[in-house]
Image (tube, rainbow, N blue to C red):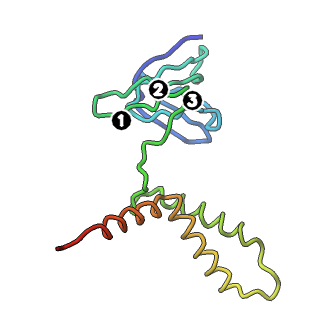
Amino acid sequence: MATVTGVVEGVSTKFGKYSILVDGTWYGTKEEWATVKPNKGDNVSFDNGGAKFFKNCTIVGGASPSAPASSGGGGKSYSKGSFPVDPEDGSRAILRQNALTNARNLFGELKEGQDVEAAVAQIIEVAREFEAFTSGDTERYAAETAVADGFSAE
């Protein structure tokens, strides 16, 4: 088994695989097996098993001083996104979809004779609460309110 170390030059998530390009060679693994999902520019080290797949991958640092530092910690990688999530961030779509699913699950199936429009409105209202919590809007609003309440123009 050979150890490969280098900078990730590219990332692909096509065909249910998570693949990384290191030193001009693509290495892949099934997405569910990728316990660490390096990003472009990350310095990585992994076993390739003599083939073009990777396992036991660790992020050993960024490619440049401007790259965010890896979280380290036992070979796990965490998102480099921000929290609270920016209102214009594309990951909002995922948060909203998840919030709708959880709200719908909370309400269960519609009963016969139940007003569908009222149920949909209620599900969306609860989904917005889920989204506000998971995106950090709840905390952002509380912080903004605290600042505004503490501000005096006098």
Q: Residue at x 64, y 75 (%)?
A: 123
The numbered dot on residue 68 is: 1
Q: Nearer the viewer, mark 2 or mark 3?
A: 2
**In the rendered structure, which amino acid carries the disc numbered 2?**
Ile
**In the rendered structure, which amino acid carries the disc numbered 1?**
Pro
Q: Residue at x 46, y 58 (%)?
A: 136
Of mark 1 and mark 3, the one earlier in the sequence is 3
**In the rendered structure, which amino acid carries the disc numbered 3?**
Gly
Q: Residue at x 54, y 24 (%)?
A: 57
- Residue 73, relative to residue 90: is it above or below? above
Give the residue number, with chain letter if any, for mark 3. Answer: 28
Q: Residue at x 61, y 37 (%)?
A: 31
Pick the quarter of the image with the N terminus.
top right
The numbered dot on residue 59 is: 2
Tell me residue 120's x, y (percent): 65, 79
Q: Is residue 60 left or right of residue 32?
A: left
Between 45 and 23, the residue placed more toward the observer is: 45
Of mark 2 and mark 3, the one earlier in the sequence is 3
